[in-house]
Amino acid sequence: MKTAILSVGTEILFGQIVNTNTVYLSQQLNLLGYDVMYHYTVGDNTTRLKEMIDYIFHDCDLILTTGGLGPTQDDLTKETVCEALHDKLVENEDAMNKLKSHFTGSVMTENNKKQAYFPSRAVIFKNKTGTAPGFALSENGKMVICMPGPPGEMTAMFENEVRPFLEKMQDSVIFYKTVRTIGSEESRIETELLDLIDQQTDPTIATYAKETGCTVRVASKRKTREEAEKAVDEMLVRINERIGEYVYSTEDEDIEQVIAKKLLAKNLTISSAESCTAGLFSATLANVPGISAALNRGIATYSNEAKMQELGVKEETLEKYGAVSAETALEMAAGLAEKTGSDLCLSVTGIAGPDGGTPEKPVGLIYVAANYSSRAAGKDEGGRQEIVLEYRRKTQNREWNRRFSVMRMMELANKILDGKIESHKK
Amino acid sequence: MKTAILSVGTEILFGQIVNTNTVYLSQQLNLLGYDVMYHYTVGDNTTRLKEMIDYIFHDCDLILTTGGLGPTQDDLTKETVCEALHDKLVENEDAMNKLKSHFTGSVMTENNKKQAYFPSRAVIFKNKTGTAPGFALSENGKMVICMPGPPGEMTAMFENEVRPFLEKMQDSVIFYKTVRTIGSEESRIETELLDLIDQQTDPTIATYAKETGCTVRVASKRKTREEAEKAVDEMLVRINERIGEYVYSTEDEDIEQVIAKKLLAKNLTISSAESCTAGLFSATLANVPGISAALNRGIATYSNEAKMQELGVKEETLEKYGAVSAETALEMAAGLAEKTGSDLCLSVTGIAGPDGGTPEKPVGLIYVAANYSSRAAGKDEGGRQEIVLEYRRKTQNREWNRRFSVMRMMELANKILDGKIESHKK
């Protein structure tokens, strides 16, 4: 069913709140098999709200609204929806009793009473966490479902009342998986998948560029969840044949989660030595709960002095090759390995910008190195191996270069753990 | 001018991303004096997008779009806007050259080229942080401004190109300052300013709760910039009388920028030792360009072994008081001071959650300590001082607790640098 989500509230138009209701409802409705075609937001204004409802119905059959059900005079959604669907408000005895009991022992101001009035044809949805109930109202095959704006009230009402109501109305199910990749531009991923995307009817395939790498969404809409799941899984096999080398998750996980899982499963330890990123890699890895069993330490050696003292980088190396060099990156990783004995020791040094570049060492020059035990790479031959990678970025943007560096460290860690790195034995 | 924000992208309708672009643009446009009347979201579909543009123009004169400018075939915004405003696409030489240079040394797939085509009447906006430029296109007093979807690219383009463009279109000038505070709840800030807020006509005063602390925006809309600036400055004096103790910037700076400025101005050095935040403090501080002159090192000592080895925390201390204790936090800071000699040595240890809490040491228990030279506090008496602060948070949310910890370290660092900390001499 073609569906729109309509948020009501001037505060949203001022940018005062992030509209998480719409994100939640979009996810839920898609999972239930409703096609969310549009999101709309309008202020607390009867004329514009009514006009918008009329307009939305030219292409959609179902509107879910949030907001504007409360007791104050700028709460107009119920009245306006009632008018748009040619009904009138009548007092609901249950709702009035519940409202009165809610205010037992305190004064109920007169404006609260309007929360007990509903369109005469409405199906009412209880609000267990607040005072304003919701409702569904329909006319000639078009339906509006109204819910309160506070996210806690809305989600509780959706789960307890609206979802079962919507499930009864449905005849198909959508299932989707989100494939996360790293190390390739969106344009290359799309080119690899182009014939699959072009042939798509069901499952559908869509690519999205994210800061952390390109994401591919595979979705199927079928009669049953089993059928949809099977169609998605079959398509995932074909996608993996094309772009498998870049895929790190088909479960929409972040790469630090994937790395943490592998470390914990194999009982491996990790440490990092960071220059330009100054701790951002270790901090990102520590996003994952339970990482303390694997994460030994992170050393942000911003100064040359710190690189020498903490990691044993040689003064000659810094003088001869510079702090931003393959040699320094390798010595940082080696020094860290010696100090911590961690299975996987990663290092990074680079020129994040916007200043500090020279013709030979421009902003955007980044070295990522690793020094790791054979166990980390899934081998039993003993000893350690090392690798260093060079990147040259065109942007002067400090934040981007630093995040890029962290993602390259993640990519390298993941590849090592997958045994996909060919590196020379130390 | 009546304005709508139109987000383009099927991923938004699936609820896969939170639409922060709309929040940002709503805030910015309102500050510039544009009336944001509606938010719309539509998927990657030419027909529906064109229909929506036509519809929006029945009530609005300006549409800002985000998304759908990239290289892939589901990026349709430019083509559709061009069609809706009766123009045709022509190759832009500058954009093509920039695109080619971006891909120097790597392969530019054919689909990338479409990013160098624009409507013939368009004003083009450069994209310094990505490949897809934006543009403004108008017809008969109606205008569409198109920007890319990735938030980093969009905000950079808005700040550098679109905002000045929009400012020129206005007949009055809005001037505003953003006061940043730390260490107080929004409700307290609002209560302190309530009479000023209630009396407001111009300048207007608005408070916003942010993760990093409460922000107060003071804005004036006048004929000239000078008049507006004077009105804002006068109001700032009154605001500072009320809440000055919490204010760390009236220039909308992040606290790490304010701290970095003070460190660099006084030629001071800083180092950090982090447990639960695992490098997030040092990484945040390193957001600031030029910090390398002040930031010596950051040590993320996640394991007890690391705390002992790196910072000389005593085994007895860890056994007797635990890793999360005032004693451990102080020893971490002291060990760091001994090792680095940095003027300002900060440490943190806490239980971020969601697991790992006990009845005596629940999730949300955080200790922040500092060990600092008298120079850091602006005094010449020599020697070092130390302080430790305890926080007990109710939330189990790992990310929130970690960010909260970083902000408390920032708050403490800033207070020390302002000479506002009374602490016992070591």
Image (cartoon, coloured by chain):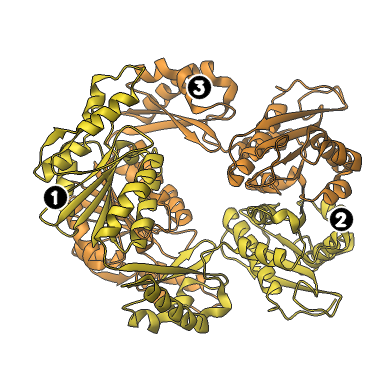
Chain colours: A yellow, B orange
Is residue B112 placed above or below B205 in the rendered structure?
A: below
Quadrant for the C terminus of chain A, please.
Answer: bottom right
Q: Which label sits on residue B188? A: 3
Q: Is residue A411 left or right of residue A234?
A: right
Chain where mark 1 sits: A
Amino acid type of the residue tagged 3 in the rendering: Arg
Amino acid type of the residue tagged 1 in the rendering: Asp
Residue linked to disc 1:
A54
Q: Residues within 10 Å of mark 1 (few under 14, many from 20)?
A: some
Is residue A216 placed above or below A256 in the rendered structure?
A: below
Say which of marks 2 and 1 sits in front.
1
Q: Residues within 10 Å of mark 2 (few under 14, many from 20)?
A: some
Q: Is residue A104 left or right of residue B59?
A: right
Estimate the spatial distance between the alpha carbons at disc 1 and disc 3, rounded to whole Å: 43 Å
Chain where mark 3 sits: B
Residue A12 vs residue B174, the one in the foreground: A12
Do tags 2 and 1 sit on the same chain?
yes
Residue A77 vs residue B185, the one in the foreground: A77
Give the secondary structure at mark 1.
helix
Residue at 33%, 77% (x, y): give it.
A202
Chain where mark 2 sits: A
Do tags 1 and 3 sit on the same chain?
no
Q: Which label sits on residue A308? A: 2
Q: Residues within 10 Å of mark 3 (few under 14, many from 20)?
A: few
Give the secondary structure at mark 3.
helix
Whole-percent x and y of residue B318? 85, 41
Do tags 3 and 2 sit on the same chain?
no
N-terminal label among 2 and 1: 1
Whole-percent x and y of residue A38? 27, 57
- Quarter residue A99 falls in: top left
Q: Are marks 2 and 1 in contact (CB under 8 Å)?
A: no
